[in-house]
């Protein structure tokens, strides 16, 4: 959809990246690292000063002690972190539970590992799961792992403590790993609270926590990811990581230490900033009379366009970009089930960008008569 947006000069609210710069202190650190180095390979599983700064920060926010030498691997983005985690946890033929809707890479990563995905639906509009259906998936398939995106992409769902405890209980009962994607851990809207699965009693040894610096510090192009896990899991992930990519960029790790040492006030300001962005964009959706699920975390919102007779969400998304001038992602790209009435916008944009998109969305109804399902 980014290509479509660029071709028709639409406001791009499809692919989830900011249109604003990272923090100035981080940019200054990147400039220093660019001139002073290091410019050669770091330790393959992560530069020591990066791992130390990261472990201090995560110990604070996860609420559990993280050892920089025993519990951390630095990867080339959370994409590699997830791939390394699945290759470590699973053998060919193993089953992996994935909540649907899901970030597209999860299915591809599972298949590339040689494992088989088993889908459990999250039910719109609140994207809750049926505990009976989840237990059935475990009983029928004895999965080796479950993938949990929290906060969720594309749903904006923040899993509650009781939901996490239910998942944890099944993982323990059936001796499964929980592989979490927590890249949006610091983008959570009150009163919701992000809880790391690894912090629940008895779960650290069977949880592989994947994350990255991309969303928290607005550096999606730097490709700095992380894995946190128990020492025996980390030993295996280091080997997989070494053969996948050798290591993440040394000068960028050096620069990122500055961000990892930010005071807690940075994260409060980040939350306030994204809360304001969410309020701006949801305000426009309200003005346009569009139905949506209010996101609890991350920076995405799922919008229900069934009132326009949509049965082909790809055709609708392309029409929306060309006719209305706003680009979204067709919701069906995230679902295993035949769901074609949802589209996803993201709001990691400057207020002026969100206002421009909102003003265009106000014209949607006047153009709706020209839409034709594929």
Image (cartoon, rainbow, N blue to C red):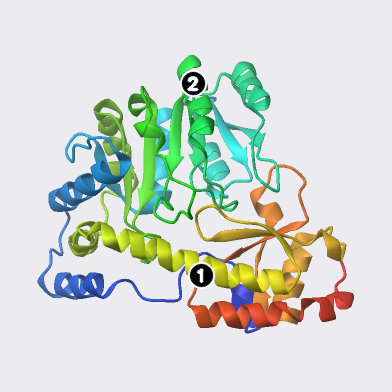
Quadrant position of residue 6: bottom right
Which mark, residue 277?
1
Q: Nearer the viewer, residue 25 or 75?
A: 25
**Where is 13 relative to 50, above or below?**
below
Question: Which residue carries the number 2 mark?
Answer: 169
Q: Is residue 130 left or right of residue 168?
A: right
Which mark, residue 299?
none
Q: Is residue 325 left or right of residue 295?
A: right
Q: Looking at the image, how many numbered discs can be counted on the residues? A: 2
Quadrant position of residue 95: top right
Q: Residue at point 16% right, 69% down?
A: 33
Q: Is residue 309 left or right of residue 273?
A: right
- Residue 160, horizontal then vertical, whole percent: 51, 38
**Where is 368 relative to 374, above or below?**
below
Neighbour tally class for label 2: few under 14, some 14-19, many 20 plus, Cα within 10 Å: some
Tell me the SS state at disc 2: helix
Looking at this view, name the residue that lies furthest to the left. 36
Looking at this view, name the residue that lies furthest to the front. 191
Quadrant location of the N terminus? bottom right
Q: Residue at point 56% right, 68% down?
A: 279
Q: In this view, does 255 lie to the left or right of 278?
A: left
From where the camera sits, is residue 90 visible? no
- Work out whether mark 2 precedes mark 1 in sequence or the reverse, and give the earlier one: 2
Q: Nearer the viewer, residue 333 or 125?
A: 125
Neighbour tally class for label 1: few under 14, some 14-19, many 20 plus, Cα within 10 Å: many
Quadrant location of the C terminus? bottom right
- Residue 274, horizontal then vertical, whole percent: 46, 65
Q: How far, Cα to Cα, is label 2 from label 1?
A: 36 Å
- Residue 42, horizontal then vertical, whole percent: 16, 53
């Amino acid at each position: 959809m980014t290509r479509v947006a660029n071709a028709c000069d639409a406001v791009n609210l499809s692919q989830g990246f900011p249109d604003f710069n990272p923090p100035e202190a981080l940019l200054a650190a990147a400039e220093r690292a660019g001139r002073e180095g290091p410019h050669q390979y770091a330790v393959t599983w992560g530069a020591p000063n990066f791992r130390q700064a990261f472990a201090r920060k995560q110990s604070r926010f996860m609420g559990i002690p993280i050892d920089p030498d025993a519990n951390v691997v630095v990867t080339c983005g959370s994409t590699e972190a997830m791939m390394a985690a699945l290759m470590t946890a699973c053998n060919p033929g193993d089953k992996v539970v994935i909540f649907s809707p899901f970030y597209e890479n999860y299915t591809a990563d599972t298949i590339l590992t040689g494992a088989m995905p088993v889908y459990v639906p999250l039910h719109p509009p609140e994207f809750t799961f049926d505990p009976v259906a989840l237990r059935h998936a475990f009983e029928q398939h004895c999965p080796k792992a479950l993938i949990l995106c929290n906060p969720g992409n594309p749903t904006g769902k923040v899993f509650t403590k009781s939901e996490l405890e239910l998942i944890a209980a099944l993982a323990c009962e059936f001796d499964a790993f929980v592989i979490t994607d927590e890249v949006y851990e610091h983008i959570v809207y009150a009163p919701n609270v992000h809880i790391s699965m690894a912090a629940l009693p008895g779960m650290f040894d069977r949880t592989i926590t994947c994350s990255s610096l991309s969303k928290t510090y607005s550096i999606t192009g730097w490709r700095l990811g992380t894995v946190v896990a128990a020492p025996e899991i980390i030993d295996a992930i280091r080997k997989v990581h070494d053969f996948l990519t050798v290591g993440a960029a040394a000068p960028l790790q050096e620069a990122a230490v500055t961000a990892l040492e930010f005071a807690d006030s940075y994260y409060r300001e980040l939350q306030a900033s994204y809360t304001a962005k969410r309020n701006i964009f949801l305000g426009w959706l309200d003005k346009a009379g569009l139905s949506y699920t209010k996101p609890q975390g991350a920076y995405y919102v799922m919008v229900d366009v069934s009132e326009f007779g949509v049965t082909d969400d790809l055709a609708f998304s392309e029409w929306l970009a060309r006719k209305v001038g706003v680009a979204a992602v067709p919701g069906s790209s995230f679902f295993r089930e035949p769901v074609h009435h949802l589209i996803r916008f993201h709001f990691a944009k400057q207020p002026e960008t969100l206002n421009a998109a909102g003003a265009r969305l106000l014209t949607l109804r006047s153009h709706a008569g020209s839409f034709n399902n594929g």
